[in-house]
């Protein structure tokens, strides 16, 4: 899918959200939702620790849930969710059901799985989000991996220290 002029800038902003999540003691994942003009509507870091260890409190799922309750389907079909890592199958389902029309991600699920291994806090599903979206009845454009090396650096030190 075509990359837009502001995709790298907004994806790096999602990386900054991931860094803030880590600085506050959480897993280094971040996402943001932008409208068609590139205006950021909301940022969301990983919520695992803040939600008391809720393993479903991924940044993308939390952001999709917020979007589904605060924006219309018509608005969301023109929005892009930027994510430091490829949305997992759970998050891709939430993005689809929220009605978000486009996703841009940094690190692929496959690469994240290779990097984190079988860590109990991140039992990564190697299922591309594009496969989840393709099973749906409304289109969801996917761009990624983009800036994958930068995205992988967000995770490298964190998971090696969790060893």
Image (tube, rainbow, N blue to C red):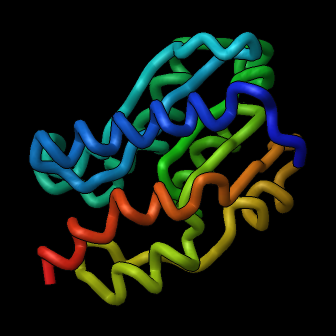
**Residue drawn at the location 79% of the way across and 25% of the way down:** 77
Q: Is residue 8 above or below residue 108?
A: above
**Residue drawn at the location 24% of the way across and 55% of the way down:** 27
> With 26 as the anchor, is 135 left or right in this view?
right
For the C terminus, which image quadrant? bottom left
> With 71 as the anchor, is 160 left or right in this view?
left
> With 67 as the anchor, is 4 left or right in this view?
right
Q: Is residue 160 above or below residue 17?
A: below
Q: How many marks?
A: 0
- On the question of residue 64 being in view, the answer is yes
- On the question of residue 86 being in view, the answer is no
Q: Is residue 65 above or below residue 109?
A: above
**Residue drawn at the location 24% of the way across and 73% of the way down:** 159
Residue 93's x, y, as percent?
Answer: 62, 52
Residue 97's x, y, as percent?
Answer: 67, 40
Q: Nearer the viewer, residue 156 or 27?
A: 156
> With 34 as the anchor, is 138 left or right in this view?
right
**Residue drawn at the location 48% of the way across and 43% of the way down:** 60
Residue 85's x, y, as percent?
Answer: 50, 56
């Amino acid at each position: 899918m075509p990359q837009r002029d502001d995709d790298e800038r907004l994806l790096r902003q999602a990386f900054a959200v991931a860094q803030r999540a880590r600085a506050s003691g959480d897993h280094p994942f971040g996402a943001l939702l932008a409208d068609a003009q590139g205006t950021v509507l909301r940022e969301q870091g990983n919520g695992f620790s803040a939600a008391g260890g809720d393993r479903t409190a991924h940044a993308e799922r939390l952001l999709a849930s917020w979007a589904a309750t605060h924006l219309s389907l018509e608005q969301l079909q023109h929005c892009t969710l930027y994510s430091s890592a490829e949305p997992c199958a759970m998050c891709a389902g939430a993005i689809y059901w929220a009605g978000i029309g486009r996703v841009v991600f940094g690190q692929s699920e496959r690469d994240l799985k290779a990097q984190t291994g079988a860590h109990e806090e991140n039992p990564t599903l190697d299922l591309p989000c594009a496969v989840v979206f393709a099973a749906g009845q409304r289109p969801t454009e996917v761009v990624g991996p983009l800036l994958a090396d930068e995205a992988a650096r967000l995770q490298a030190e964190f998971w090696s220290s969790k060893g």
